[in-house]
Structures are given as C-alpha cells and as structure tokens.
Image (cartoon, rainbow, N blue to C red):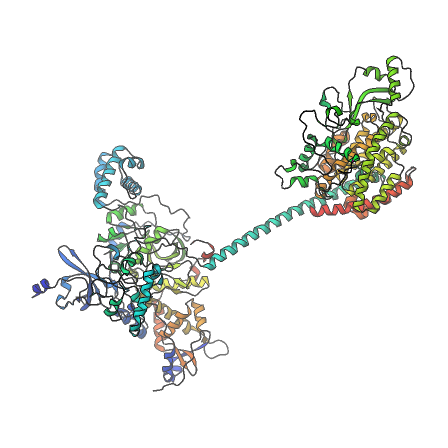
C-alpha cells in the first residue's frame, strides 16, 4: 500500500501534508517548498501553515504523513520553483516570481503595498494593459479593489491551471484569461521591481529562493545557531554544513580551519566603532555604515539570517549601526544591534533591530529598544521603529511600550491642587520619545483608555499594576542615560552620509 | 445593553487625561461600549504574518497576563559550544578605562583576506619541507593571486610580478592556486555578489549592497546646503572687510602717534633754539608750502660726445618717495617723454590747440593712481596726455628733439645752446656753458670744451672794461656788439633783485623767460578760473604786485602744468615766504661767514649763501613738514644755496628751478594717502645726507627723531596736527615775528599771515582727509 502510494505519488513542490513537528508535539499541516537528496534519502523543505517561516525546515519522509498528502492547490501558497533560471527570473512585484511554467502575479495579501506604478509606465504596452485591466475590472469591482493591483502585474501563464494566487482573494481564472497576453516579453526584463531606497525593511518578497533558508547552521562565538531566514551570503557557502563567523569582525568562512587561521590574524576585539555607552559589562558601539563598510555588511548579512523583512538590496551607507556587546576577558561579544537611518524622513529611530537568538528572552531586546529611545531623547525627537515589524518585534515593542508607559502612569503624582494625576498623550510621548501613535496604540492595547462621563480617562487595574511591578523587578539591567556619551550629528549638513 | 446614543469625541493627544485606578470607578463598565470608538491603531506588521498562530497566541497571552512569557513564539534552537569556544578565542583581552574610540584609518588591517583551509594546510606543510613558506606567507600569496584576478585568471607571468618570492615558490603556489580554482570554479575568497551594470542582477537575491542610484537627499536639505554656502561666503567677505578696516585703523593710529611725537619734538626743538616768537616755525611753514617735492630732470644729453658735462651742484640726497611711486618716477626719468613735453609746452605757447587743461588728473589723484590700476603694464602703461603732442617716430633723421638743430628736424631751442658764462668776482669767463635742471632740481651746468677756454677765462665779459687785446678783445667786442647771450650768476636777494638787469645776459634771458611766463601764466589763470577761487586770484595778483623780483615772479608763475589749485596756491605762498626768509636772513646776517667757496661770487650772491650756510636750520626745519612734496623741494634749494658751487648759478634759476620742476610733478603728491605715507622717508634721508654732522650727534632710533633732531628746529608739523590752534599760534608767531623782524616788507608779512591762516585751514582739511583714508 505504502509502496503503491509512493510509487503513485511522487512528492513535489506544492504538495501539502501533515508533518510531525520538530519537538514531536503533534502533526501540523505543511507545504513542500523544496526537495533535495541527501545521503540517498529525499529531504523536503516544508513550511508549516500559519507558522512563521523561521520554523520552515528540511524533513525526511519519515516525519511526513504521506498518506494525507494533498495535491497542489489551484492557488498554491508559494510560487513554484523555477527550473533552470536562477534567481526567480524577472518576476513581478511582491511575491511574484514569474516562473517559466507557473507564472504568477503579485502574491500579495490584501493590504500589502500596491505595486509601484513606475513599472507599468516603463512601456506603452504596460500602460495599455493597465487601461484594459481597468476596463475588464469593472465587472469584478465587488471582488475587491486589490485585485486590480494584482492584475496589473499579472503575468499570463501558459499553464492554464496555475493562475495567480492571492491568499485572501479567490482565484479569478476567467478574469485572468481576459487579460491581454503580450505583456510577458516586455515585463520580464524590465519589470524588475526595485525596493524603495529609504529604510531597511522590505515588504514581503516571496521569491522561492529567498523563501528557503540557504544556510543550515552558523557558528558565532560560542554559539551554533540555526538561521531563520535566507541571507545573501556567497552562494558557495550554502553547501557547507556550518558557516563560521568571527564574532568580532563578523567575517564568514567556510571551515573551522579557516576560522582558526582568521582568528590568528584578526585584530578586532570589539566592533570597529566608537564606544558610546558602557555600564558594567554592557557596551554600545556606534558604527557608520559608510566608514566601516565591511563590518556593516557582515553585520547585515548576519542579521538577515534572523530578520525576514530586512533588505540587503542597497548599500549600508545611510545607516548607523548600534551594536550592543557584552564584555569579558575575550573581548566584546555581540549580543544584538539595531540600525538607524542617519536621516529618517518618517521619524524612524530604528530600522532593523535584533537580539541574536542565544541572547533572546533575557531582556536584551528591551535594553536595545530602551537605548534607541535614549538616543531619541538626546536628539529631542520622538521615534518609532521602521515597519513592517516582525512578530517578535511587535511583541518586544509592545512589551517595552507597555512597561514604559505604565511605569510613568503608576508613578505619576497628583500635581498641586488636584486630587488626581493628569497627563496628556503628548506628555507621555515627550517623556519617553515614543511616537504619539505608538503611545495611543499601547494605551489602547492595554485597555487603559476609557470614555467616562464625557471625557477620556486612563484607568489602571490592580492586576496591571501588579504585573507591571513584577516585570520591572525582573528588568534589572536598564540603560543609564548618564553612561551615554553621544552627540547626535546633523547628517543633512554633511552632504554625504 | 447599554447602548449609547452618542459618539465619543475623538481622542485628543493634547488633552489631559486623569489617571484612575479601576476600582475607583465601579461604574466604568457601563461606558465600556463607547471605548470601541477609540481608533484601532495598526500593529505595523505585515497583514499575512499578523495572523500567524504563535503570534496570536503570544499577543493574547500578553494582553491577558501582561507578558507573553507563558506562550513564547518558538524559534529554531541554538547550541552553546563553550568548550570549543574557549580553545578558539583567546582570553587575553583587557578592558580599557576609557571608552573605545577608533582612529579614522586605524582599522585598515594589512592582513590577507584569504584564510587557509585544511587542504591548503596539508599542501603548505608539504611545501614547507622544500621551501620557505609559512601559512601567513601562503595566505598572502593566495590573496594577491585572488585579488589580481578579475574576470580573467592571472597568468604565471603576472603572478611572478604580483608575488615577490622565489620563482620556485611562485610556480608551486601558482599551480596549486590555479588547480584549486579550476576545480572549485569559484573565487577562493568568498565575497558577496555585487551588482553588474547591465541590470541583470536586479532580482538576483544573492546580490546585495547595491549602490543607491539616487542620492538620498530631500530637496529641503539641498536648499539648506545652498543657503549655508551663501552664508559662508558672506561671512568670509565680512571678515575680510573687518580685517581691512582693522589694518587701516592700525595705520591711522600709528600715524597719529607719530604725529604726536613730532609735535613733542617740534616743541622741544623750539624750546632748545628758543624760538619763542615762532619765527622759525613761520619760516618752515612757508617753505613747506612753497616747495615741490620732486623734480623731473631734463634728459641727459651729455652723451652727445662733443660736450663736457659737469654736475655743478652735487646733491648726495636721494629723493625718497613711497615705493609704489618709484617706478613711475623712474619711468619718467628714463624715457624721453620729458623733453617732448617740454617742447610741447612751448608749442602751447604758440597755438591754443593744446592749451586745453589736462583733465586726466583730478586734484585728488596722483598719476600713479591712474597708472597702477587695471593696466597690464602697471605703472609703465602708456598714457596719452592732453597737453602733449605725439609724433610718429622719425626714421631717416636724428629726431625732433628740442635740442637738435632745425636741420636735424629739431627745434633748436635756445635753452639748449651753449653760451658763454661769466663771473663777476673774480671777473672771468667760464667758457661755453649750458644750464639745465638735473634730477631732484639740481642745477647742472654743462661745460663745453673749446680751444679758447683758456683765453676766455681771462676775459671779463661783464665788466665791460678791461685791457683786452688781440683776438680776445675782438671777441669780447664781438659778443657785446652782437649781444650774444651769456650767463652770469645772480643773487636772489632783494637788493640784487631790484638792481639787476644791467647786463646783456639777463636781458636776453628775460625775454626768453617772459615768453614762458606768459604762457604759463595764461594757463594758471585758466586754472584759477576753473577753480572759481576768488581769493586765489587775489593772492595771485597780490603776489604779482608784491615787491618780488621779476625772476621770482617768473619762477612762481611758470607753472604751466600745475593742476592742483591748492598746490599752486601753496607754491605761491611759499614764494613769498622764501622771500621773507631771505629777508630775515639778510637782516640777521652775521659776520661769521662759513662760506668756503673757492669761487668768488658776486656780493649779492655771497650774502645769501652765507646766510644759508650759517642758518641751515631754517632750511632744514622744513624737512619735517608732513607734506613731503613740499619738504623735499624746500630742502633742495636750501642745499643748493648752501653749497658753494651754487653761487655760480643765477639766483633766478635757483628759485625758478625747483618750482618749475614742481609743475611736472604736482599730480604725484596730490593723493592724500600718498602724502601721509610719504611722510617720513624723504625727510629722514634728506636730513641725514644733507646734514651729516648734525645727524651723527643724535640717535637714529626713530626716523622722525633723527630728522627733527638734526634739523634742530622743526616746528612746521605743528599745523598738521591741530590745525586750528596751530593756525592761531602761527599767526601769533608771525605777528611777533613781523614785529620783531627788521624788515621793510611788513605789509607783505601781514598778508602772508593771512595766507598762512588760509593755508593752515586748507591743509588741515587735506590732512583730515588723509587721516580718514589711512
């Protein structure tokens, strides 16, 4: 039976089937994204549905319930791997990786950024296409406005049964077929989508290559860490079982011997920047992405292993990197970092932020966030992290915001002549450098704002106060503003970053 | 249930909110539904990720428990490899006391990027037995080979150039490297792919860190840059101005200080020489206004070969002007413009065509001001002057110089002719001479050698009687009958002036001078008309009507090119002042004559000279006048006079010379700044050279001190310091002087006093201007 099944069913990309979770804790529906042969056995790269991509992994057939395998859906979640053409070809926007056979349109969910118009304007045909799409879209207006966006980048597919996918909208093959066809030749080469030049985060990019982790394991300092996401380390490193990374200069080498040799030569014992904060064994270094290019790039490559939305598309020049280190007899060990645009047009005070996995859940993340707001305080600005946030980012920031705001609210004393402390949202924002919107969002998330007798009030429940006090008791290490020796630079006057 | 019929107001971030504890307001739940109206803020996450299972779980846990600790988001695991780590990284780091601060270029490591792997290690160990190779050396070689290869792999020849090792080692390493590279088919130093120009890498996920095509800068910032750039330019300009102003102030204050010192010196000297009446001051004042500063010499014609040039009056002094003016001066001296101009001046006499006034030079400007500016030739630039005729060069003849005979195309002017010259005491004839003006107003007498010189020296042309015999007698008779002009020294004294004109020479010359004087006087009148100076004209007539001799009259009025009314006036005044001086001198003449002339001048001459010699101070006092143009010229006649040889020169020449020379230079000194700057140099030098014995006794620490000390009487500057008081003082002094002075021309002195007052005022104005400029 199984033999029969196996003979019948060759598992391929796009198949969905339950897979035994890594920790052995039950089965979870997963989708096969890739396939490789390793020591005579097939290994499948699977993505657990509704789980973050960081849990995607290579699994052997043993962990898969092949009997329950489902054929690829009409609307596969992920684009098919393109055969023969590296890099996903000149796919359209967002998640579109225009596979030769399984060409798909914008794989974006609702609400994701619309495809930038400049692409269509690249040639007249595209404009014509947009117009014709508009025409045809009249009939399906009610199906959702985002479809129009999607359609404008739709690459007509020769294989009729693999239409464009969209997670939340139903496939519309009929509409698809109405789409004029001559787009493909022009769009493929010229339709290359280029990320925006500001910021460091990019909206989801469902390229099949970048969807799959390319590094199995890294060794950084005294940790061996499983990467979470794709990172554009040199392709040659993909095949090596472990990528060795120097914990000081973050140089990557392919073997233990190379690391030994490198360590014999490497002179760095700390990030190549100025130490701007030191309290006990925690230090922060400021690194200019333009001056310390090599380090900044290595740092970005490392960070990309753990940050899904980070883009390494452009150089690091417009960024400053604040690296948090723990210092001991061997030097300054990188714990985490955040990057920051030298000039942010959108009041971002953090671009990317990462605590390295071994240090996570130890309060370092909050320390990083606290430090970033401390810098904003020195600058006299309010700031916010660049979007999109990751799940962990959202949790960390919410946690930080909650604790910071609750700390203020709880410690507020009634001013003279009033029986009750009074505060405005702007005051909270100014005290914390947390952007006003984030303050509101936090107050709201914590259910602190209530409308009472014609005006808004802030209410604190006893449980909230208890939890807050406990949480703050745990946050032993805090940023001490007195230990920060830093002057903000006015980068706009420098002409260059 | 409790449906509320009204909408809550929007949340206002500026509105104060009271902070309650939940149990303080038990009726809150009744209002709970309205809370929905608080707008939901976006999480900032990607929508598709927001719904992820673990996140939702954690978010709800966070909301419920205040922390998501219970339900964490699972992450891939990490392993601690502390044992291995301890062996790999050395524990020799020592914390610095100071924060770490990296140097700008300190981090550039000169270490090879290539790291040896195990395969390399085997090979290196193998090779190490045969040749000298260390892992580091191997890595350097590999590094060079790798970096030397771009698209194309380096050849062995190139490798040999790249690697500075033995050939054997190079070949071995190169072979090893090449094999390994061919086998691996990728660069041995792994690097992140960089973009290619053709755009083919746009979507390659392995290409990272692309250059930003557009400079990420907002318009606002660019505007700021421009704005700040402009501001910087303005700032620099303003600072430059401030520096200039400060420099000028420095100069002004320095000058003020000098002036103050001069005043003190003047008063001290006056006290020493007991000039309580102010007579000496008066003299100096007068001289100062009269004398021109520089002289343009006639072109030197001594080179003609047939004549013998003798510089009769030797002046050791050099004219000192501000350095800037020097080239101009030299230019004038060295070119032949001067004679031409002279000739043109004559021309003006005959035709009115050229008599138009020279408009090119305004009173306030010196020629150098014109010439220095905006001309590539600087001070040497050619300038067409209105009073000059410019002729095309003559190619087939000698030229049209004034001294050439008409046959040669010249004018054959009389003044270039050699004439007989005679002395009255001892009565003798000098031979054929020609008088001309030398550099600095020196009077030169060119002597021409003739075979009859010996004979002539024994004749006395002036006496009119004598036992002449033979050829000589005939010759004398011939001269007398033909009224061939000859020179005779003349005294400038009043007596002499009034009683002159007895001989042929003076008669002859007078006609000649009258011609000139007529012409120059006409010009002067024109000038005065233009200046609309009523008073000036009065003075003119006054001076003309005064008891001055006709010679002095000539000298005064022969200012054909005087362009500066003030100067002309001052010159006029100076003339009368000199007269006073000489009168005074003649009055106070003492018997102690220091004259050591080998010649025997006429009595009138000798008296003048002896006076000058006795009282050199009165002459030298002028030296310290703050207007050097005047001072210099004042000195020059003084020296001329005190020199014994001067006695051979007719008096009218003495006074005529410098003043007529002044005509040509007046423009130079009219720039106020130049005037002030010229202050010290000429004076100092003049004194030192003209009066060496006096100078040596005093220290030379300060030019001013030396100048005034050597002069031992320097009161003139006083009026340049404080015009009003000084004018009053000087007028008083003059009054005293005129009372005391046993002179005939009291009336004239009174006139002079009024003149002096006027002059003081004018000078003070001039001086104020100068101060402002500096």
B122 w.r.t. B34: above or below = above
> Where's residue B760, x and y in %?
80, 45
> Where's residue B102, x and y in %?
40, 50
A449 in the magenta segment: no
B354 in the magenta segment: yes
Give, as a single range, the part of the protein colored magenta: B351-355
Q: Residue at x 88, y 15 (%)?
A: B473
Q: Is residue B135 left or right of residue A25?
A: right
> Where's residue B531, x and y in %?
79, 46
B214 w.r.t. B614: above or below = below
**Residue A137 vs residue A119, the one in the foreground:** A137
Q: Is residue B199 visible?
A: yes
Question: If the image is split into quadrants, where does the N terminus of chain A sit?
Answer: bottom left
Residue lying furthest top = B470
> Where's residue B217, x and y in %?
43, 57
Q: Is residue A313 left or right of residue A99?
A: right
The quarter of the displayed image where residue A325 is located? bottom left
**Residue B187 vs residue B549, the one in the foreground:** B549
The quarter of the displayed image where residue A74 is located? bottom left
């Amino acid at each position: 039976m199984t033999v029969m099944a196996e003979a019948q069913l060759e598992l391929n990309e796009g198949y969905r089937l339950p897979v035994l979770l890594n920790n052995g804790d039950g089965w979870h529906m997963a989708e096969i994204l890739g396939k490789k042969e390793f020591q005579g056995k097939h290994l499948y790269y699977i993505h657990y549905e509704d789980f973050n991509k960081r849990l995607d992994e290579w699994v052997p057939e043993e962990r898969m319930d092949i009997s329950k395998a489902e054929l690829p859906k009409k609307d596969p979640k992920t684009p098919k791997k393109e055969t023969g053409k590296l890099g996903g070809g000149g796919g359209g926007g967002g998640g579109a990786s225009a596979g030769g056979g399984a060409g798909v349109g914008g794989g974006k969910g609702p609400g994701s950024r619309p495809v930038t118009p400049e692409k269509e304007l690249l040639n007249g045909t595209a404009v014509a296409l947009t117009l014709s799409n508009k025409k045809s879209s009249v009939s399906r207006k009610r199906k959702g406005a985002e479809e129009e966006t999607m359609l404008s980048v739709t690459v007509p597919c020769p294989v009729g049964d693999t239409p464009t996918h969209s997670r939340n909208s139903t496939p519309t093959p009929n509409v698809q077929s109405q789409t004029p066809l001559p787009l493909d030749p022009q769009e493929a080469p010229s339709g290359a989508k280029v990320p925006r030049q500001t910021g460091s985060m990019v909206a989801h990019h469902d390229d099949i290559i970048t969807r799959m982790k390319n590094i199995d394991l890294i060794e950084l300092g005294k940790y061996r860490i499983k990467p979470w996401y794709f990172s554009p380390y040199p392709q040659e490193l993909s095949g090596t079982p472990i990528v060795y990374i120097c914990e000081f200069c973050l140089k990557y080498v392919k073997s233990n011997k190379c690391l030994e040799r490198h360590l014999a030569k490497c002179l760095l014992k700390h990030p190549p920047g100025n130490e701007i904060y030191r309290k006990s064994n925690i230090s922060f270094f400021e690194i200019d992405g333009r001056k310390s290019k090599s380090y900044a790039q290595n740092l970005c490559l490392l960070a990309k292993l753990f940050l899904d939305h980070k883009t390494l598309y452009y150089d690091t020049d417009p960024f400053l990197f604040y690296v948090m280190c723990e210092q001991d007899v061997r030097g300054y060990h990188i714990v985490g970092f955040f990057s920051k645009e030298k000039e942010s047009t959108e009041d971002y005070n953090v671009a990317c932020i990462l605590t390295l996995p071994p240090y996570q859940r130890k309060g370092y993340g909050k320390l990083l966030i606290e430090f970033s707001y401390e810098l904003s305080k020195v600058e006299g600005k309010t700031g916010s992290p660049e979007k999109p946030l990751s799940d962990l980012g959202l949790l960390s920031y919410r946690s930080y915001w909650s604790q910071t705001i609750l700390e203020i609210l709880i410690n507020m004393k009634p001013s003279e002549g009033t029986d009750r402390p009074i505060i405005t949202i702007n005051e909270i924002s100014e005290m914390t450098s947390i952007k006003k919107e984030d303050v509101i969002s936090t107050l709201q998330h914590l259910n602190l704002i209530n409308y009472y007798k014609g005006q808004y009030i802030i209410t604190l429940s006893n449980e909230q106060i208890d939890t807050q006090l406990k949480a703050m008791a745990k946050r032993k290490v805090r940023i001490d503003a007195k230990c920060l020796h830093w002057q903000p630079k006015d980068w706009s006057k420098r002409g260059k970053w | 249930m409790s449906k509320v019929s009204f909408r809550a107001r929007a949340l206002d971030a500026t509105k104060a909110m009271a902070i309650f504890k939940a149990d303080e307001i038990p009726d809150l739940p009744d209002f709970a539904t309205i809370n929905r109206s608080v707008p939901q803020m976006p999480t900032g996450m990607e929508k598709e990720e927001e719904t992820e299972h673990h996140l939702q779980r954690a978010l709800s846990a966070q909301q419920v428990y205040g922390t998501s600790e219970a339900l964490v988001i699972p992450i891939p695991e990490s392993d601690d490899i502390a044992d291995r780590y301890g062996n790999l990284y050395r524990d020799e780091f020592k914390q610095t006391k100071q924060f770490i601060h990296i140097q700008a270029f300190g981090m550039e490591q000169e270490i090879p990027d290539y790291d040896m792997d195990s395969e390399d290690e085997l090979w290196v160990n193998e090779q190490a037995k045969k040749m000298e190779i260390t892992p580091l050396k191997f890595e350097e070689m590999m590094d060079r080979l790798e970096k030397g290869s771009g698209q194309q792999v380096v050849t062995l020849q190139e490798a040999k150039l790249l690697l500075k090792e033995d050939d054997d080692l190079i070949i071995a390493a190169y072979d090893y490297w090449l094999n390994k590279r061919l086998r691996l088919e990728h660069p041995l130093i792994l690097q992140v792919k960089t973009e290619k120009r053709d755009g083919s890498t746009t979507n390659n996920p392995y290409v990272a860190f692309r250059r930003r095509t557009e400079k990420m800068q907002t318009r606002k910032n660019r505007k700021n840059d421009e704005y700040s750039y402009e501001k910087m330019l303005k700032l620099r300009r303003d600072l430059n101005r401030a520096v200039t102003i400060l420099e000028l102030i420095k100069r002004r204050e320095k000058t003020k200080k000098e002036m103050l010192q001069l005043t003190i010196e003047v008063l001290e000297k006056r006290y020493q020489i007991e000039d309580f009446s102010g007579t000496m001051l008066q003299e100096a004042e007068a001289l100062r206004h009269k004398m021109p500063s520089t002289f343009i010499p006639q072109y030197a014609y001594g080179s003609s070969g047939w004549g013998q040039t003798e510089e009769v009056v030797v002046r050791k002094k050099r004219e000192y002007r501000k350095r800037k003016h020097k080239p101009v001066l030299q230019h004038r001296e060295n070119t032949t413009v001067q004679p031409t101009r002279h000739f043109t001046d004559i021309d003006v006499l005959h035709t009115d065509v050229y008599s138009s006034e020279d408009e090119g030079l305004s009173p306030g400007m010196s020629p150098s001001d014109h010439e220095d500016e905006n001309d590539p030739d600087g001070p040497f630039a050619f300038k067409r002057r209105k009073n000059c005729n410019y002729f095309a060069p003559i190619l087939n003849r000698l030229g049209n110089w004034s001294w050439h005979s008409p046959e040669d195309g010249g004018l054959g002017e009389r003044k270039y002719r050699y004439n007989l010259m005679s002395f009255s005491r001892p009565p003798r004839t000098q031979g054929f001479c020609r008088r001309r003006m030398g550099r600095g107003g020196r009077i030169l007498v060119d002597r021409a050698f003739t075979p009859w010189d010996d004979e002539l020296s024994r004749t006395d042309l002036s006496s009119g009687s004598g036992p002449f015999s033979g050829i000589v007698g005939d010759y004398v008779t011939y001269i007398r009958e033909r009224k061939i002009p000859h020179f005779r020294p003349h005294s400038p004294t009043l007596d002499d002036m009034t009683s002159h004109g007895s001989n042929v020479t003076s008669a002859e010359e007078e006609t000649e001078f009258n011609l000139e004087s007529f012409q120059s006087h006409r010009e002067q009148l024109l000038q005065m008309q233009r200046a609309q100076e009523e008073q000036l004209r009065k003075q003119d007539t006054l001076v003309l009507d005064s008891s001055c001799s006709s010679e002095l009259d000539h000298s005064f009025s022969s200012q054909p090119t005087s362009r500066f009314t003030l100067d002309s006036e001052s010159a006029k005044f100076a003339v009368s002042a000199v007269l006073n001086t000489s009168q005074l001198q003649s009055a106070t003449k003492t018997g102690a004559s220091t004259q050591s002339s080998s010649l025997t001048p006429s009595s009138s001459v000798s008296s003048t000279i002896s006076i000058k010699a006795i009282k050199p101070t009165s002459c030298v006092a002028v030296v310290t006048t703050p207007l050097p143009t005047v001072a210099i010229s004042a000195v020059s006649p003084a020296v001329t006079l005190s020199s014994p040889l001067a006695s051979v020169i007719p008096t009218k020449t003495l006074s005529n010379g410098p003043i007529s020379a002044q005509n040509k230079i007046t423009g130079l000194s009219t720039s106020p700044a130049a005037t002030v700057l010229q202050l010290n140099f000429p004076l100092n030098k003049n004194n030192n050279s003209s009066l060496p014995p006096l100078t040596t006794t005093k220290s030379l620490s300060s030019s001013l001190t030396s100048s005034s000390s050597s002069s031992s009487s320097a009161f003139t500057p006083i009026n340049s310091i404080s015009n009003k008081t000084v004018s009053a003082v000087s007028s008083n002094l003059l009054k005293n002087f005129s009372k005391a002075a046993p002179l005939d021309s009291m009336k004239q002195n009174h006139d002079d006093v009024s003149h002096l007052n006027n002059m003081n005022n004018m000078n003070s104005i001039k001086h104020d201007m100068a101060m402002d400029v500096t």
